Image (cartoon, rainbow, N blue to C red):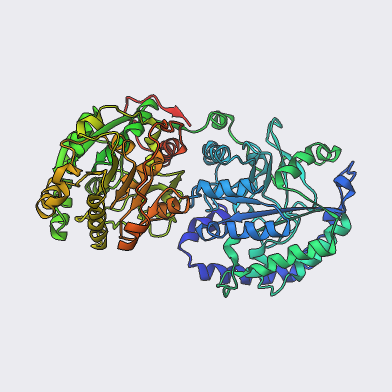
Amino acid sequence: MKAIDFYYQIKPVIPRRLQIYMRRVIAAQKRKVTTGTWPINPAAAKPPQDWTGWPEKKKFALVLQHDVDSLRGLTRCLKLMDLERQLGFRSSFNFVPEDYPTPSRVIRTLSEAGFEIGVHGLKHDGKLFRQPAEFCAKVPRINHYLRKWGGVGFTSPSMLSKLNWIAELDIEHACSTFDTDPFEPQSGGVSSIFPFLASNDAKTRTYVELPYTLPQDHGLLVILKEENIGIWKQKIDWIAENGGMAALNTHPDYMSFDGAEPGREEYPVAHYLEFLNYIQTRYAGQYWHVLPRDMARYWRTTAAAKSQERLATKKSKRLPPEGLLQRNLGPVTPGVKIWIDLDNTPHVPFFIPIIRELERRGHEVVLTARDAFQVCDLAEEKGLRFLKVGRHYGKNPIMKITGLVLRSFQLLPFYLHQRPGLSLSHGARSQNLLSNLMGVPTVLIVDYEHARTAPLTHPRWTIVPDALSPEGLPSNVSHIRYYQGIKEDVYAPEFKPASSLMEELGLRDDEMIVTVRPPANEAHYYNPESDLLFHELMARICQTPGVRAVLLPRNAQQEQTLRAKYPGWFEDARTVIPSRAVDGLDLLWISDFVVSGGGTMNREAAALGIPVYSIFRGKTGAVDLMLEQQGRLSLIRDKDEVWSKILFVRRDKNRPPDNAPRAALKDIVDHVEDIIRVERVRPCGKGKGRKA
């Protein structure tokens, strides 16, 4: 095993402080013996053969990139984007796809603002280039993320480089080298401040390598502990004098923003902004600033490109041709057996399109359902085949825990009979508990970040809307995946209004219809304030002529309590309660507006474009805050707002529903298949497998 491979093998167990200390000691020694070649290597100034200069006769070129090494860096990307944009600069943000979740909204925001998106390895673990076969297996996955993000660029973690291997990726450009940098793990530079073409072993694939030519921020400001950017200024002056490409790769992970005191591995973002301002003022009108992809496309048109083509910086092993056969086809997902547990009523419509899509892709889906909240009634009405297991045990905490454990044991015979390869749910704790004990990978889809997770029920993977922050979610950050929109976008596009529900409920066209969902007073997140708002709302409805309420109690006990305690609500049929489990979307569609003390019905109304008001008074989730910001949901916070904020207005019910497909369904199923590949779930024998 090479020394560098050994280091990355043991690196996870070396304390971070010790890693930094060791690197500083080694860097200090290297700095003493490399004064003639760092930060400036005079040999790197030699232009390539047939070089005629930059477009518009500019003095030098400028390319900016940001490698986002961690979740901390991800949270700072948009701040950095705004700062660069204010100064008139654009850059590439390069993400590590399997180390942390990258929300599509971040990708979308950066792209729409004119920035580039790239892939920064697969994991930031130093193991990408260990063995040819391992690298070949990772090529389809890297290409998958490039396609998903619309990227054409690759940057290598820790600047580990095998140019002939990198050329097998579906890219136009990469950064895995430098002109001179003795402090990197592979310290041999390419001795050039110009781009160059690199190719694979067969010379059938090429890309433009963009070596960074200014010291990286972490090495300069953290490891070498430089207190200013004097070296950056010195180096760019030299690059400008020699007509080269000034390529700087920085990391938002190590920048401190908003005047905060820099941490142990941070420096003020003001240093980076000072560098940009220095270029703008000293070299105004003299530099050609482009994105990496534009630099690569330009370089291919130059005569200099062909004269400087290289195969590799060092002798690299050849990749086995058979290992690259799947490169253009994408990763193959085997057909596996997936167990879905329907734990609550909203899970039924949510999972129907997911089940259909999973089966279309060659997977076998088996179902269980809890006898609670009309779950089984609705599942039967929708034609689902399932096994009924367990029930709800009320709001008493001891009974909840007892029920959790008991239902897990009740599910055991089903598990032993079916032997699923993956467990999937939207909050089925008993399924998670049993699956964790049996070693089955668990995938939890969740859209409320404040829900508590019981011990031993934490899922291995979590899939969430991209409005949520990864902090506080029940899975490790590297095992969180995002989907666009809200979960109700999965099934709302399939909605087709039924014409018989109005007549069935005894409602008339000339009445204003309000659908009301009481608070979930048995849930752990219940806040009694929700009931105060609910009672105030019902009082207003009953006092307003021409208004009818359709009330949807959460269970029979809640219905009995409300009928006994508030008989006036039901006089003259002012309030009706459906006698059976009705389709929630159908009911919302005949309503003029909706008021709910829970989450799903609110978001269903928002997905259908129906006015909706939330009287939920638990911790407000990120999805509801997003919908409020978008004007699709109104949050009611006190009794006064029940009267001032809720508008008793008829809506146009002749408008057809929006049946355009939305991204959520595809995102979720794609994530499930990604997880199947990463977990190497055994095929079930019935699925044919599918290329991503």
Q: How many marks?
A: 0
Q: Is residue 43 above or below residue 136?
A: below
**Foreground residue among 402 and 2:** 402
Q: Is residue 550 above or below residue 41?
A: above
Residue 449, horizontal then vertical, whole percent: 36, 55
Q: Quadrant of residue 293?
A: top right
Whether residue 71 sits left or right of residue 299 in the image: it is: left
Q: Say which residue appears at 58% left-offset and 40% top-offset.
A: 146
The residue located at (62%, 46%) in the rendering is 112
Q: Position of residue 235 (x, y in %)?
A: 80, 63
Rendered residue at 41%/30% (across/down): 656
Residue 385 seen in the figure: no
Relative side of 335 to 523, left or right: right
Percent position of residue 12, x then y: 47, 60
> From this viewpoint, is residue 30 visible?
yes
**Along the viewing direction, whichever of 27 and 611 lies nearer the viewer:** 611
Is 249 placed above or below 667 here? below
Where residue 39 sits in the image (x, y, percent)? 77, 64
Q: Which residue is at a point 20% across and 34% down the rendered structure image?
A: 506
Which picture quadrant has residue 488?
top left
Q: Is residue 64 left or right of residue 490?
A: right
Kindly give the residue lying farthest to the front in the view shown. Answer: 545
Q: In which quadrant of the rendered view does residue 38 lie?
A: bottom right
